Amino acid sequence: MNVVITGGSRGIGLELTRFALQKGYRVLAQARTPSNSEDLLKLKSEFSDLEIFFQDLESSDVHTKLSNAISEWSHLDILINNAGVYLDDESIDDFQKSYLVNAIKPLFITRALFDKLKKSKNPRSIQITSQMGSISDNTSGGSYSYRSSKSALNMLFKSLSVDEPWLISLLIHPGWVKTRMGGENAPLAPVVSAAGIWKVIHSIESTHNGSFVNYLGQKISW
Ligand SMILES: NC(=O)c1ccc[n+]([C@@H]2O[C@H](COP(=O)([O-])OP(=O)(O)OC[C@H]3O[C@@H](n4cnc5c(N)ncnc54)[C@H](OP(=O)(O)O)[C@@H]3O)[C@@H](O)[C@H]2O)c1
């Protein structure tokens, strides 16, 4: 199984990467810089099937370069758009960064990898979204840039699921997870969330295309 994961340096992305390598999959993990990626580099010393692609998702040609990085691969089975940011709502720049990293780049990366995904027998595109992107579930307000960028991510991939039915696209909420983003009070360990996400990925069928679910596979309302 050939897999690409963004945001592999830490948190949920690191555990998704570790899990895939333990399963014997070939993984290309995107990370920003080597200095930020100590744990990922340690994984590379343990697993020869891990390649690391260093590039910021904010850079304009990241999707093209990511596609070039797997040009030797015969196919791509699973793309996991995991990298994300939670910023203050102080500036327009915060909103632009949130939309770019959380919503726009996942779509452009997915499109850039279409050729390799089309060569898989069972191609899947997995977006790590958030329940905070659910409009009907929003009863506490706040987090304007984060919430709306995840709602945008959900809408982009709902549309993609309609237009590209050959690709199973899923939006997965990972739970409230103890990472730099989730904070110390979060109840879920990253390894538990990642194991749940992989269980969902392994069980999805074409009827699930365009669904919004949590890491246990339970549906979330839009
Ligand atoms: N933790 C939760 O409770 C929770 C809940 C709902 C949804 N989520 C979602 O789960 C995903 C993973 O979050 P996490 O909790 O693991 O957060 P995290 O520990 O803060 O990790 C975020 C990851 O995204 C990467 N990233 C951020 N900005 C980037 C950029 N401009 N270019 C490339 N990579 C970038 C980070 O790389 P660096 O190490 O280089 O910064 C890091 O690998 C996110 O999409 C998040 O929205 C998390």
Image (tube, rainbow, N blue to C red):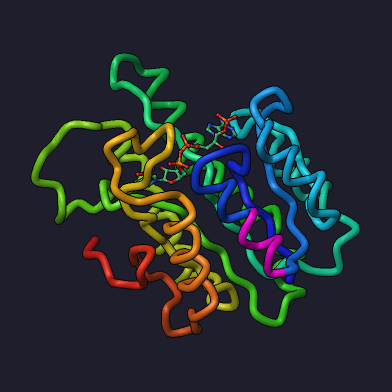
- Image position, residue 68 (x, y; %): 83, 47
- Image position, residue 92 (x, y; %): 36, 18
Res 121 quadrant in image? bottom right
Nearest the camera: 184 or 212?
184
Nearest the camera: 193 or 27?
193
Residue at 78 percent of width and 45 percent of height: 44
Chain part drawn in magenta: 18-23
Q: Is residue 8 highlighted in magenta?
A: no
Residue at 42 percent of width and 79 percent of height: 208
Residue furthest to the right: 72
Residue at 49 percent of width and 34 percent of height: 100
Residue at 47 percent of width and 69 percent of height: 161
Say above or below: 134 vs 77.
above
Say above or below: 146 vs 95.
below
Is residue 176 left or right of 10 when viewed as pictured?
left
Residue furthest to the top: 91
- Image position, residue 67 (x, y; %): 77, 50
Res 218 quadrant in image? bottom left
Residue furthest to the left: 139
